[in-house]
Image (cartoon, coloured by chain):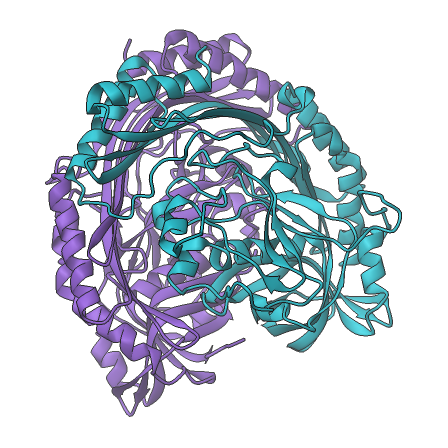
Chain colours: A purple, B cyan
Amino acid sequence: MTEFDVATAAVQAALDAGARYADARVMHRRYESMTARNGEIESVTQDESAGVGVRALVGSGWGFYAVPDLSATAARTAGERAARIAAASGRVAGPGSKLVPIPASTGSWSSPCAVDPLSVPLSDKGDLLVRATRTSQEHGADQAEGLYQIWDTRKWFVSSEGHRIDQHIRECGAGISATVIGDGETQRRSYPSYRGQYGTQGWELVDGLDLTAHAARIAEEARELVTAPLCPAGETTLILGGEQMALQIHESVGHAIELDRILGWEAAFAGTSWLDLEQLGALRYGSELMNITIDPTIPGALGSFGFDDEGTPATRRDAVREGRWVGTLAGRDSAAIAGLDYAGSVRADGWARLPMVRMTNVGLEPGPHTLDEMIAATDDGVLMDLNRSWSIDDKRLNFQFGCEIGWEIKNGRRGRMLRNPTYTGIGPLFWRSMDMLSSETVAWGTPNCGKGQPGQIGHTGHPAAPARFTGVRVGVRG
Amino acid sequence: MTSPLDLAGQVVELVRQVAGSGAEAEVGTERADLALTRFANSFIHQNMGEAATSVRLRLHLDGRTASGSSTVVSSAGLRDLVERTVEAARHCPPDPGWPGLTPPTELNGTGNWDESTAAASDDQRAERVREFVETAGGLEAAGYCRTGHREGAFANTAGHAVTGRHTEAAMDGIARCGGADGVARLSSFRLADLAGGVLGARASVKARAGVAPVELPPGRYEVVLEPTAVADLLQNLATYGFNGKAYNEQRSFAVPGAEQFDRAVTLVDDALAGPALPFDAEGTARVPVALVEHGVTTSVAHDRRTAAEAGAGVTSTGHAVPGGAATGAVPLHLRLVPAPSRNGLTRAGEVSGPIVDSDTAALVAQVRRGLLVTDLWYTRVLDPRSLVVTGLTRNGVWLIEDGEVAAAVQNFRFTQSYPQALAPGAVLGVGRHTALQSQTFSNAWWSAPPLRLASWNFTGGASG
């Protein structure tokens, strides 16, 4: 019995039990990770997970049931159970559920991969992390850590509308960090990002990072940070590096344009959004430099796929164009309720989880400048980069982000290193103050986006470049 | 159907076959049936169930250690798990810190189990949601009701084999009124303890009392934190402060033997008081562990590895978590011990207003000027050693004047050291009853009374 047969049996069972729509996803995922500390391997783990999740619509009520058993009997039972749960949903029924139409796709999709990351010998991967963390320790890190993660996911999707899609998505990434313990506080520097850099690519991504080449630098910077002056408090011109910009986009744009949040479906947990659908197409989100796209077709970015988990083909669209809000991240049911004619942003983090609206690659199109040009054009300001902490309110308006490192900018030059830099603001006011934007774009991968109940971890991508903002409050402290 | 203990035994036997008698292995298995009914805009919009079986294997072979897990529990799947974990271990460098296996020991019970919760139907959860929505009195309601049961087992090659099971239930919802949200949440190992109607009424009263909030200037305010907010303190103290690995690496504020907290603060990690298996990820029996007694930090949480690293005389406290080599040993069932109850009741009485129970009302009555805070939200650590945290208030803040609620207040952002907020002289009152709260579908449960604190550092208004 093939995986498609299992999914088909589940869908048919749900229909037989009264569902007016059903879909099923068989998923098989292998995950491997390794951590190293101070020149030693700390942990190696290899996980495997396989099962089928079935979604059924009865009347206006949804039901979902998942089992780790890929036999025909278990699949049929799961389909029946999903329909039964959907019927129970009708006890507290809402508006009639509809789905925006999409073509019934059949096909296969695989992410690009030059070097299968699971085929690289563990000893080679271990040597890389050992070498990098040992180098970092030798250059002053009290705790030098390294990490890689690999996900190899196969999905088979079948729907009662005729979808029959299989995908093979390989993702991996790695990073290192150096922590120095000072008097009463700790400082950490990372490369290339807070948790590393990730993409839908093979091991060539990790090879390209050249972790060891940066190990000494981050240790020395962490040690220097311990005695660096604190980031001054006040209002100033702020330049953000590309990695922190990725986080800024993720938190204050990506989540805010999720249609399920806008509709109130996440109100009790993840929160809602300050955006009002009536303003779609008209609202001024940011300055005219602000062009945000939703693009799951970017080769190698972490939020890329061929089809989402409702079978909608990957399509690029605008979210913000010249500062104006024009698009949302949507699923078939949320789009229908909102009166939109597109979906394509629904994913689940495993066979046992309900697909929900998730970011794909939400990124900022590049501008005309370079980071050096932005610094040269700044008389008085602060440059910050690499995220250290992130916090934003439930409407995605008020944020406070901390970075690993900052530098003062005086008279067009980068000056002293600054410790514990933080900045705070209100999303649309902040984005409207963006007055310079760099062309140096990197598609950063975020492998740890939490959302939903039960909690799901999403993989998202964020093309981002350094940018400059005026009149930003920095240096908030307890 | 194979029992979790038999499954664990099969994997131990496979390890002996594949890796020989010299291998040390520990196997954890779990069979979980979990269901969650989620509602928003006053209707059920997501409703799901899952039956999951999982196997975790940690293997120490020829001085090297690796681990793996799988949900594929067929004969071939289990053999694959063992073979690839053995292969991984062979590629790993020596692990001189390997602490060895848990020897055969007795458990402290089998876990809290309620038959009717284990058998809870989709309709029973939907009925509680209906009650919540109805008692919200026309306000928009959102939240979830969940039930589940887990049966777990642990076996190792040292001959230790144990089993346990527990049920769990939780309800968490908000009511929304004119831009204000009010929340009510409660957890138990018994679904019967959760009344959707009571929680819906509570949430709606708070929401109505939160309409038209005034903006107050940032600054330091005396606060009464409801149990929902205190849970966030416990979570961050547990993850960053009482984590044995963080302590060993000097990343924690904890100094055993030092009076780091107010005398009113006693913190005990007590997994077996709520929904939990009676053993940790290394098979160590769970027992109540005091981490702070009357303000004095007494210990931190350890697994076998962090205990060995900590030095002679330190043993595992039963806080091993899967993946602990990287994340450390974390107390996930922390309880702030309440003040003695005068009438012996286990629950505080209901009060109709933004102050939802008599326990919190008694603390509010003592405040001349301060703030009543319902929830702390999106909290992130700015400095792990001093545990300076930033975050926001959520689901209701009110100004207290002369012992009474005077006005609803706009949400604040805060930046505050949590140990400093609980430092000697800083705790002005502790409630007499605790409320158990869960993190969605995780195995962390926080048990907290309300708290009155002398000062909390609000750094800005959240609305701009």
A419 or A333: nearer the viewer: A419
Q: Quadrant of the C terminus of chain A?
A: bottom right
Query: Viewed as shown, does residue B76 lie left or right of A62?
Result: left
Residue extending furthest toward the right: B343
Q: Is residue A474 above or below residue B343?
A: below
Q: How many marks?
A: 0
Residue placed furthest toward the bottom: A411
Q: Residue at x 83, y 50 (%)?
A: B341
Horizontal arrangement in the rendering, residue A317 relative to residue B395 (left or right): left
Q: Quadrant of residue A38?
A: bottom left
**Name of the residue lying farthest toward the front:** B313
Residue A448: x and y, percent? 38, 48
Q: Nearer the viewer, residue B86 or B292?
A: B292
Residue plotted at (34% across, 46% down): B325
- The percent position of residue B57, horizontal first and vertical second, equals 33, 30
Q: Residue at x 69, y 29 (%)?
A: B190
Which is nearer the eye, A334 or A166? A166
Q: From the top left corner, tell me how far across and down residue A465 is, in percent.
A: 27, 65
Residue at horizontal 50 percent and vertical 45 percent from the top? B317
Note whether B60 is above or below A447 in the view shown: above
Quarter holding the N terminus of chain A is top left
**Relative depth, front residue between A201 and A364:** A201
Residue A90 at least partly seen: yes
Left or right of A123, for residue B223: right
Q: Is residue A368 something one can see in this rendering?
A: no
Q: Viewed as shown, does residue A376 lie left or right of B285?
A: left
